[in-house]
Image (tube, rainbow, N blue to C red):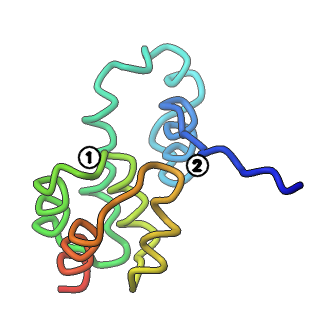
Amino acid sequence: MKSISQPKFIMNRDVLKLLVEKNKQFSEQQIKQTPEELKFDARLHSYLKQHLKNGYKESQIEQLKQLNCLTEIEILHVVNLQPQNECELFILLTNYQSLDDNQIQAILSIIQE
């Protein structure tokens, strides 16, 4: 019998470590000394603004936020992994939540501008 894999959730500390590995702005010591909740959203937001290597505009990220169906972490993944179609977007967000067709289409229309 096949086991169904459980959704994977990314904890704040894990995401912070990923950000550290990518941009080397925070040392391990700084992470240990900073409460995880403190300004975490602000860190993610500044990370999104500073590291748009794929060319997404800040206005596109703001539009994604206004849809109110994606979390900051999901937006980070959408921005970094650049899904090109419904299948890729569905796979990308499977670990977080299920979106209806209209929400997926709204996200795609923003990221494919």
Of the pair 81 and 42, the residue shown nearer to us: 81
Count of number-bearing discs: 2
Q: Is residue 81 left or right of residue 102?
A: right
Rendered location of residue 93, percent (x, y): 45, 60
Residue 25 sits in quarter = top left
Q: Is residue 50 left or right of residue 14?
A: left
Provide the secondary structure element on which disc 2 rests: helix
Residue 86 sits in quarter = bottom left
Spatial distance from mark 2 to mark 1, Cα to Cα? 16 Å
Give the position of the C terminus as an image quadrant.
bottom left
Checking the image for residue 110, the label placed there is none
Give the position of the N terminus as an image quadrant.
bottom right
Q: Amino acid at mark 2?
A: Glu
Look at the picture and state if 13 lies above or below 61: above
Which residue is found at the position 84% from the left and 56% from the top?
A: 2
Of the pair 61 and 91, the residue shown nearer to us: 91
Rendered location of residue 29, percent (x, y): 57, 21
Q: Counting residues from the N terminus, which is met first, the one under dot 2 or under dot 1? A: 2
The residue tagged 2 is 21
Q: Amino acid at mark 1?
A: Ser
Instruction: Give the class, few, some or many, for how many residues have Cα within 10 Å of label 1's Cα (few <14, many ≥20).
Output: few
Look at the picture and state if 31 lies above or below 48: above
Which residue is found at the position 59% from the left and 45% from the top?
A: 7
The residue tagged 1 is 46
Of the pair 104 and 113, the residue shown nearer to us: 104
Which residue is found at the position 33% from the left and 19% from the top?
A: 38
Provide the secondary structure element on which disc 1 rests: helix
Q: Is residue 34 left or right of residue 10?
A: left
